[in-house]
Image: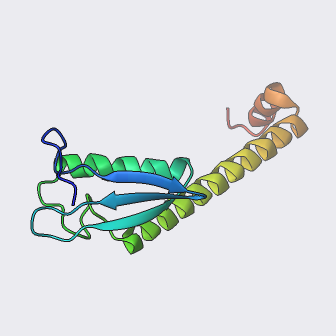
Amino acid sequence: MIEKPDWLPERAAHIWTVGDEIFLNLPPAKGRRGHTVRLPNNDKGLGVAITILRDREHQAQRTVSTKGAPTQYQIWAALRKKQKEDAAAKLAAAAEKRAAKQSAEVLKDLGGRKGVKKLLKELGLK
């Protein structure tokens, strides 16, 4: 077994890629067991890896299933949640864009701002 250099912190992890995956080896805290997790080899996967490494820096106890040493299931769940949030945000943006387009069409049909002011005046609302 290779000895760990003195300058290497206990929280250090190993990272490498194979094809479409990033592998993150999370060494154990003293007396514990380490493990390796897989992430997608893209911006989201790298972002998750960086988050885990930052959490390891601030977490004294890095046992399995904590933020600094998540399980593969926890990572998949987080990626699915993020994917759903991104999809919901896209849907909301598309709905907002459609509503703005429809509003612009209605405003145009009413004769623009002047037409709306005139209509409001005729209805006694302004």
Q: Is residue 60 left or right of residue 36?
A: left
Residue 115, above or below 46: above
Residue 77, above or below 122: below
Viewer-proximal residue among 60 and 34: 34
Tell me where residue 8 appears, x and y as whole percent. Answer: 19, 42
User: Which color scheme does this rendered protein use?
Assistant: rainbow
Q: Is residue 78 visible?
A: no
Q: Is residue 71 left or right of residue 91?
A: left
Residue at x-position 48% and y-position 65%? 81
Residue at x-position 20% and y-position 71%? 33
Viewer-proximal residue among 32 and 100: 32
Tell me the quarter of the image containing the C terminus. Answer: top right
**Farthest residue, direction front:** 1
Residue 1, above or below 110: below
Residue at x-position 30% and y-position 68%? 35
Viewer-proximal residue among 64 and 74: 64
Viewer-proximal residue among 52 and 107: 52
Quadrant in the rendering for residue 23: bottom left
Tell me where residue 41 appears, x and y as whole percent. Answer: 55, 54
Number of callouts: 0
**Farthest residue, direction top:** 114
Q: Is residue 24 visible?
A: yes
Tell me the quarter of the image containing the N terminus. Answer: bottom left
Tell me where residue 117 appears, x and y as whole percent. Answer: 76, 29
Tell me where residue 40 appears, x and y as whole percent. Answer: 54, 59
